[in-house]
Amino acid sequence: MRTPKLVTNYEYMSDAELASLASRTADALRTNTNFPDLDPSFEMYEPVALGYIAKHAITATSRASTQQTREKDEARDALIVMMRRVATYINNFTDVSSTQLSSGFLPVAPPTTLGVPGAPAWSRLRHSNRPAEILLEFGAVRQAYEYEMEIAYETDVQGQLIWQTVGTNSSSRGNYYAPVQDGVRYYFRVRARNRKGISAWSPVSTLLAQVDG
């Protein structure tokens, strides 16, 4: 029987992907009681993770200086080392998959089954109960560890939609976009990602936003 393991090397991730995973693992480990003697400790892990997230947010804009980019790269290197140490400890601590995954780190997929994920079969926009917000829904994809979402509400001179990224998420649930403008038609598409590659885009869905006065 194959022993489950967590991924320990996250160098392959883009900056945005690594920041997302850093946030996910920090949230998962903050109140996690499965690893009472985590080594390195959460008190050591959290500032490294949050430090990288903050520096990535600064450099995600075109206004970042060379010094800020260098500091982000240094924080990235430190986080990758820290992630490797924490994931390795968890792998050695337990071979119970559910306990491992409670850390927020990614599982090692069986080598014979992992391939490029398929595209989400459908996407849907729905009105939210909260004002000026729309819900982004789509079908989950097996073997995908992350989804990349895009919104459009304008066209270029050729009449083509101008797509804008609205971030990534590891779940097909709980995604939303805000603020929206009343009477504007929004378009939505999503694609799946894993270590093997990126899927094609999902079918495009659309919704005319209605914002209560």
Image (cartoon, rainbow, N blue to C red):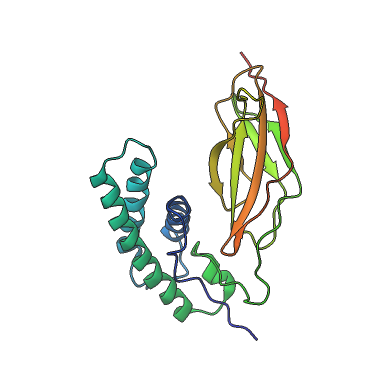
Q: Quadrant of residue 35?
A: bottom left
Residue 43 on image: x %, y %:
31, 61
- Image location (x, y in percent) of residue 16: 45, 50
Q: Residue furthest front?
A: 158
Determine whether 49 is above or below 138 in the image.
below
Viewer-closest of 56 and 155: 155
Q: Is residue 213 above or below residue 65?
A: above
Residue 98 horizontal/vertical position (percent)? 58, 70
Instruction: Kindly give the residue lying farthest to the bottom in the view shown.
Output: 1
Viewer-closest of 98 and 190? 190
Residue 122 x %, y %: 75, 45
Q: Is residue 172 visible?
A: no
Side (left or right) of 126 relative to 54:
right
Q: Nearer the viewer, residue 28 or 161?
A: 161
Q: Is residue 74 left or right of residue 6?
A: left
Q: In the depicted view, which residue is nearer to us: 151 or 104?
A: 151
Q: Quadrant of residue 118?
A: bottom right
Q: Quadrant of the C terminus?
A: top right
Quarter the N terminus occupies: bottom right
* Residue 30 visible in the displayed image: yes
Q: Is residue 56 left or right of residue 130?
A: left
Occupied quadrant, residue 131: top right
- The correct choice, above or below, for 143 with respect to 175 in the image is below
Furthest residue in direction left, as rendered: 67
